[in-house]
Image: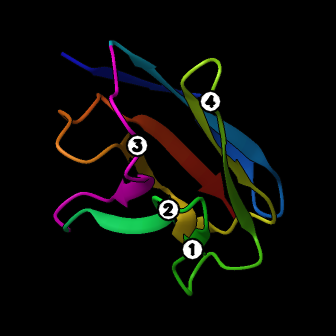
Amino acid sequence: QVRLVESGGGLVQAGGSLKLSCLASGSIFGFNGVAWYRQTPGKKRDLVALIDGDGAANYSDSVKGRFTISRNVATNTVYLQMDNLKPEDTAVYYCRYPNTPWGQGTQVTVSS
């Protein structure tokens, strides 16, 4: 069974940067895309960025131009580079491949 472990979150001032990592352990057969989501208390989990099965990256309007998703196939790691962070980016961030269990997420807090 695939297990996802997110890391790299923390506390940063507005305008700063963080790079999140998501390591997948176990075998992922074929590649049908991978995504980063975020969630704040009391709200649903929202899609932030994804790489589709053809390798194309897509972003939500709220992060377009500031966040970059990438992956290292050799190490089964997916990254989310977050630049020019805003207080409204504060959330728990999760990665997910299709049909895999959710990981524990990593907390990102942006102070104003």
Considering the numbered disc 3 on the image, is that residue within a helix, a strand or a loop? strand
Q: Residue 73 — which label?
A: 4
**Snapshot quadrant of residue 55:** bottom right
Instruction: Find out whether the residues at labels 1 and 2 contact each other: C-beta distance under 8 Å.
Output: yes
Q: Residue 95 — which label?
A: 3
**Alpha-carbon distance for marks 1 and 2?**
5 Å
Query: Residue 72: x and y, percent?
Result: 67, 31
Q: Which of the two labelled residues, at mark 4 and mark 2, occupies the earlier sequence position?
A: 2
- Within 10 Å of the Cα at label 1, are there few (<14), some (14-19), or many (20+) other Cα atoms? some
- Against 96, is 2 above or below? above
Query: Residue 41: x and y, percent?
Result: 23, 57
User: Residue at the spot x=39%, y=57% of the render?
Assistant: 38
Residue identifier under label 2: 50
Considering the numbered disc 2 on the image, is that residue within a helix, a strand or a loop? strand
Instruction: Find out whether the residues at labels 4 and 1 contact each other: C-beta distance under 8 Å.
Output: no
Q: Which of the two labelled residues, at mark 1 and mark 2, occupies the earlier sequence position?
A: 2
**Alpha-carbon distance for marks 1 and 3?**
14 Å
- Against 66, is 94 above or below? above
Closer mark to the observer between disc 4 and disc 2: 4
Considering the numbered disc 4 on the image, is that residue within a helix, a strand or a loop? loop
Closer mark to the observer between disc 3 and disc 2: 2
Camera-side residue of 22 and 71: 71
User: Residue at the spot x=38%, y=43% of the render?
Assistant: 94
Looking at this rendering, what residue extends furthest in the bottom direction?
61
Which residues are drawn in magenta? 27-43
Query: Residue 78: x and y, percent?
Result: 58, 37
